[in-house]
Image: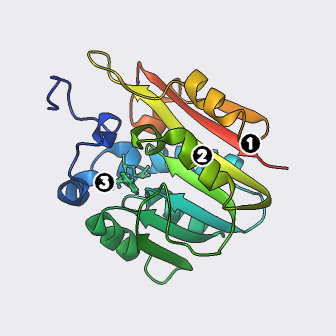
Amino acid sequence: MTNDGEPVTSANTARPDVDWDERAASFDEEPDHGLRDPGVRRAWDGRLRGWLPGRAGDVLDLGCGTGSLSLLASEQGHRVTGVDLSPAMVTLAREKLAGRDAVFLVGDAAAPPIGEQRFDAVLVRHVLWALPDPGRALRHWTGLLRPGGRLVLVEGVWGTVAPVGIPVERLTALLAPVAGQARVERLSDDPLLWGGEVADERYAVVVVTG
Ligand SMILES: C[S@@+](CC[C@H](N)C(=O)[O-])C[C@H]1O[C@@H](n2cnc3c(N)ncnc32)[C@H](O)[C@@H]1O
């Protein structure tokens, strides 16, 4: 349980006070983390296919965790760079994508250590809301994209007793001065993504830059 009395779920585990190294070993036990159930995996695979570029490209997965979405992106033909603050998460991601065209780095998602490299897509799931300055992170990430590149942001507001997260209106308002037209996809009503029904707000925002 978290200290506000809510159960630990795939969502509220994104809290900034979490010890991610300590969580890494059990992280994939949540259906939408490990994607171990074929139905859940298929659901995320289908969504990701619609969000990422149609042609193979370079994808930067920030706060990549154990690399589950990185693996889907790699299976879809993309070259992946994953960045996570937790060395234990990075170790698991490297194991998960061993032998693939993928690189994993320990670093801050807000300022990823990727030098001059630029990407066709920056993918961020369940991380942005917990960063100290999400607006600044969005501005930085937009600058990491090649022309025509896209931001793929999967976020939400989790829990009912003491909800945490970022409402879609706030995220799109932060994006407005930074990037082009944002496409919002509501995800709460698709239980296949979560391994069951959910009652809270979950969504993806995709922005394709000019
Ligand atoms: C809820 S998990 C999401 C993992 C992955 N994106 C996924 O959807 O499976 C949050 C991840 O963000 C990482 N994280 C938290 N703050 C970070 C930061 N400032 N920079 C990089 N990674 C961070 C944690 O270590 C953890 O792996």
Up/down of 145 relative to 40, above or below: below
Q: Which mark is residue 90?
A: none
Query: Is 56 or 133 nearer to us in this picture?
Result: 133
In the rendered image, residue 80, in percent from the top left (x then y), is placed at 57, 70
Q: Could you say whether the residue bearing mark 1 is in a helix, strand or loop?
A: loop
The structure residue drawn at horizontal position 47% and vertical position 45%, both measured from the top left corner, is 39
Mark 1 — residue? 179
Q: Name the quadrant containing residue 32.
A: top left
Q: Nearer the viewer, residue 81 or 98?
A: 81
Are circles 1 and 2 on residues that touch, CB within 8 Å?
yes
Q: Amino acid at mark 1?
A: Ala
Task: Report the residue marked by disc 3.
Answer: 28
Q: CA distance from mark 1 to mark 2?
A: 9 Å
Quadrant placement of the N terminus: top left
Which numbered mark, 3 or 2, is in the foreground of this view?
2
Q: Residues at badges 1 and 3 in contact (C-beta under 8 Å)?
A: no
Q: Amino acid at mark 3?
A: Asp
Distance from Cα at disc 1 to Cα at disc 3:
32 Å
The residue sitting at 54% across, 70% down in the picture is: 81
* Some atom of ligand 1 lies within 8 Å of the CB belonging to the residue at label 2: no
Name the front one of labels 1 and 3.
Answer: 1
Marking on residue 138: 2
Mark 3, ligand 1, within 8 Å: the answer is no
The answer to which image quadrant residue 118 occupies is: bottom right
- Mark 1 within 8 Å of ligand 1, using the beta carbon: no
Crowd around label 3: few <14 · some 14–19 · many ≥20 (10 Å): some
Q: Is residue 208 left or right of residue 151?
A: right
Name which quarter of the figure residue 194 lies in: top left
Q: Answer whether residue 40 is visible to the viewer in this image.
A: yes
